[in-house]
């Protein structure tokens, strides 16, 4: 009995020593790793963290540079989650580095990817007031943006389908059917009109051919007219030259005629003056001649009367020829 008890205590001591050795080795390993790593805080508000667990990978350009050490819900904001990560000291983390959640679509396991935009800023070492570690800003995942747009498209599609269902109720379906029947009748009428239009177009084509032939003949006539006009142009040019010379001669003749007319007017004026003087003298002479002529006519008249009755001329006038107050002489 004493030997069995001794073996029990020995086995228990060996197990305790083995456990202590393993714990010491793990502690030494964790202490060494902690010396080679830096801790950062990330506050997530916009991105979903489903599939992200403690120990999840932290990636930088696709390379694992750390792990998720802890996470906790914020007491101030219900949608805010504080995540603590540990990153290899050799991994470059800058002030413009952001954290994005990436997710494996097959397994659903999430990880944190650190993205640094250009231009690269200084290293992230400063610890904000009230925090225990430097804070990496939250970024925005392109996949989340795409998923958001897909969700929006899905919502719009759902709304559109709902509107379509409301549009295609029984009354609207009847109206659409009636519209289709009217459209069918309209199509039949259009087919008939198109047939008539084809015949009209054929006649128009024939008329166009005839018009083309007439245009060809008109073109030939135009060529002939142009030739005639070209030939007549030379003649017209000669005629114009001759007409120009004739007009020059006529202009000179008119100038000479104008001078002759002026001279003739002067002569006519002088002749008219002389004629006026002559007429005045002739008028006086004519008046005297008329007086003498009147006296001569009266004497001739008395002579003729006397010659008509010779008896009266010889014996004197008869009783019937006596004037008033005259008497026969004895």
Image (tube, helix red, strand yellow):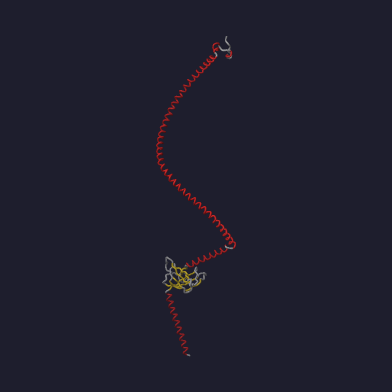
**Which residue in the rendered view is the most extreme toward the right?**
171
Quadrant housing residue 187: bottom right
In the image shown, does 19 or 142 lie closer to the viewer?
142
Along the viewing direction, whichever of 201 and 73 lies nearer the viewer: 201
**Quadrant assignment for the C terminus:** top right
Tell me if residue 250 comes above or below residue 183 in the rendering.
Answer: above
Furthest toward the top, the residue is 330
In the visual, does 152 lie left or right of 38? right
Q: Residue 188 at x, y = what percent? A: 55, 57
Q: Position of residue 240 (x, y in %)?
A: 41, 39
Q: Is residue 78 above or below residue 224?
A: below
Q: Image height check: is 327 above or below 86?
A: above
Work out whether residue 246 or residue 37 is closer to the camera in this orientation and state it.
246
Residue 90: x %, y % from top left: 41, 72
Q: Which quadrant of the figure has residue 179?
A: bottom right
Q: How many marks?
A: 0
Image coords of residue 180 (percent x, y): 56, 60
């Amino acid at each position: 009995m004493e030997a069995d008890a001794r073996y029990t205590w020995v086995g228990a001591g060996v197990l305790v020593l083995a456990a202590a050795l393993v714990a010491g080795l793990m502690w030494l390993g964790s202490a060494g790793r902690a010396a080679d790593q830096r801790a950062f805080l990330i506050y997530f508000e916009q991105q979903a963290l489903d599939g992200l667990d403690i120990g999840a990978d932290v990636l930088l350009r696709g390379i694992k540079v750390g792990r998720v050490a802890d996470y906790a819900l914020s007491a101030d904001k219900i949608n805010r989650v504080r995540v603590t990560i540990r990153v290899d000291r050799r991994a470059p983390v800058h002030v413009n580095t952001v954290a994005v959640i990436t997710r494996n679509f097959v397994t659903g396991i999430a990880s944190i990817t650190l993205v640094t935009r250009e231009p690269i800023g200084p290293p992230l070492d400063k610890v904000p007031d009230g925090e225990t570690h430097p804070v990496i800003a939250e970024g925005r995942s392109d996949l989340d943006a795409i998923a958001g747009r897909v969700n929006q498209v899905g919502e719009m599609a759902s709304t559109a389908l709902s509107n379509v269902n409301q549009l295609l109720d029984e009354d609207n379906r009847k109206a659409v059917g009636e519209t289709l029947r009217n459209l069918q009748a309209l199509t039949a009428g259009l087919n008939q009109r198109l047939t008539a239009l084809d015949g009209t177009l054929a006649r128009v084509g024939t008329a166009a051919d005839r018009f083309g032939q007439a245009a060809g003949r008109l073109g030939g006539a135009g060529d002939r007219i142009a030739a005639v006009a070209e030939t007549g142009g030379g003649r017209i040019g000669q005629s114009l030259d001759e007409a120009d010379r004739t007009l020059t001669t006529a202009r000179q003749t008119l100038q000479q005629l104008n001078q002759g007319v002026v001279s003739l007017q002067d002569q006519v004026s002088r002749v008219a003056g002389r004629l006026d003087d002559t007429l005045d003298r002739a008028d006086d002479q004519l008046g005297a001649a008329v007086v003498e002529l009147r006296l001569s006519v009266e004497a001739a008249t008395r002579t003729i009367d006397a010659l008509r009755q010779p008896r009266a001329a010889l014996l004197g006038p008869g009783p019937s020829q006596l004037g008033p107050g005259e008497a026969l002489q004895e």
